[in-house]
Amino acid sequence: MTARAIDGTQAARITRVNGPLVQVDGADAAMHDVLELGPHRSPGEVVAVRGPAVTVQAYEYTGGLRPGDAAVPLGRPLAAPLGPWLLGGLFDGLLRPLAGGPVWLTAGSLGATPAHGTTRRFIPSVAKSDTAGPGGILGTVATGGPVEFRLLVPPHVAGTVRQVAGPGEYGPDDVLVTVGTAPVTMTTAWPVRTPRPYTARRAADAPLLTGQRVVDAFFPIAKGGTAAVPGGFGTGKTLLLQQIAKWCDAHVIVYVGCGERGNEMADVVGELSTLEDPRTGGRLLDRTVVIANTSNMPMMAREASIYTGVTVAEFYRDMGYDAVVIADSTSRWAEALREFASRSGTPPAEEGYPADLASALAAFYERAGAVRTLGGGAGSVTIVGAVSPPGGDMTEPVIANTERFVRCRWSLDRDLAYARHYPAVSWSASFSRDTGLVGADHARRGDPGWNARRARALDVLADADRIAALADLVGTGGLPAHERMTLLAGRLLRDGVLRQNALVANDAYCTAVKSAALLDAVLAVCDRCHALVEAGTGPAAIEAVDFGPLARARETLGPADAGGITRLRNEVLARLDAAAARRTG
């Protein structure tokens, strides 16, 4: 006799279990539909259909499942439960709360809503008989945090407002507004692999300020842009991403720990919960959603976690916010794809990855963008993904394919990291395709020289690297005077501008004003050095000058103290002139 689920729907039977792959017979299910497996109702997704049998990838440990157990099709794809409880929460790859988050889900449950008795205050912004269209704002729901939760008309719903609840406390499933015949609650769900709709893409016109000089001044990213952070083990990927999560000027941060070690995720959550938000003065965690699928969690939930993260970001984008998704790391997500492909018999491509790896990466990164929302507002999703190449191989398939779809690459250099130069972002191997629009934005804000300053500094760094290779052969003393000054300029740029100490309060975050002042000061000193040697001053006299106060200004002066940097620049210039005068005297 055919088994039936608790809700009366027909239940199929499990016929085979092979790791996370489960074969089910008799299931009326389509590709990507979700099934609940066995007595614990563990979730799984259909990944293959072969006649009456379907193959399901389980999102939880399959120990205890056996042939003959029931499998219940839910008739829908994997969907993330979305609502005002997300900010400040810690969730797994399927958006189910973990320890320390709101405990209203149990193991195996999927897409449930908060427990009965949980209420939040709703304040309507529409009245009965008003007309409401997709994405329109119906009211706000109190969250206790700095980001206002806006109740929106669901996509594909439009009509006359027929019922509006008055201001008051309501539960997650209470009907707050009825638009046409569609009831609207503060809880909704969205398929994680389906991008949320918008009216149109708009041109990105503002940079995402991260507070990290090497990013903001040299390789900037626009709000709505994409960036990859490739680097081998120990080069500081996680620390750089944590710094961006802490200091970037987005409204909402979605931090996806995809296959990371548990202690690293614990550090991230601990710091976010104690760090003061520079925008609001409250906890930074209050505008952050942390999705943790650590290395000891089910492998296939890792594959879903980055889609879950970008779905959450799109949810807040549609409210008119700028959201940032930080995925650490996409390599471990790709490894989950490779493991699943090998189990399912998919023919392997390069290094064992599935042939559709590039398509999967494109499907993820293309969900970034600055858009005009359905409600007529403006919002954006920015995606920053770390890539952890095995053995530090920068030519492996995940990096090679990722670079096809991102606009920025912040490549981390092992030699810089071993020299304790952090962030270890290589100025020769990194790039940004957003420099044009970022330069235009700086010009509108009163800094028309941003692009020229950046290009000049990169030229100096490139020349210094070239000359350093020659100096290793002939020695610094054998170089012409102007080349020795170029080497000095490169050292000042590296130590005084590019290096940034995340453990020093004055240096962990840097404003655009301080960044520009530091770069201007170093370039002005370099120009004076070149002018003095052209006038006949010996390079040894210039190299003997104490440049330390300027090189240490990034740590000794506050995050916005441009005036202090100008003062130090003038002091160093005076020392140079004095050294030249003593030489000629």
Image (cartoon, grey):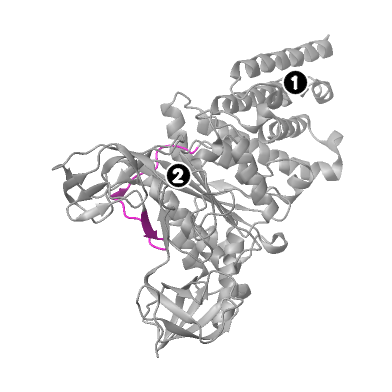
Quarter-of-image position of residue 338: bottom right
Residue 458: give its label: none
* SS at badge 1: helix
SS state under label 2: strand
Residue 140 sits in quarter: top left
Asked if residue 491 lies left or right of residue 446, the reply is right
Is residue 426 in view?
A: no
Instruction: Please state the total of marks drawn on the protein image.
Output: 2
Residue 353 belongs to the span the image colors magenta = no
Q: Residue at the far front: name it.
A: 117
10 Å crowding of disc 1: few (<14), some (14-19), many (20+) = some
Amino acid residing under circle 1: Pro
Magenta region: 188-208
Residue depth check, mark 2 versus mark 1: number of the one nearer the observer: 2
**Dominant secondary structure, magenta:** loop
Residue 63 in percent (x, y) is at: 61, 76
According to the picture, the residue beneath numbered tag 1 turns out to be 549
Where's the N terminus, which quadrant? bottom left
- Label 2: which residue? 323
Seen at 34% across and 76% down, the residue is 8
| x, y percent for residue 115 | 44, 53
Measuring 60% from the left and 40% from the top, which residue is drawn there? 272
Along the viewing direction, whichever of 203 and 455 lies nearer the viewer: 203
Q: Is residue 197 magenta?
A: yes
Q: Is residue 53 above or below residue 262?
A: below
Q: Amino acid at mark 2?
A: Ala
Q: Residue at x 42, y 63 (%)?
A: 193
Vertical order, 32 against 261 (above or below): below
Does 555 appear above or below 64? above
Residue 194 visible in rendering? yes
Q: Mark 2 to mark 1: distance in Å?
A: 38 Å
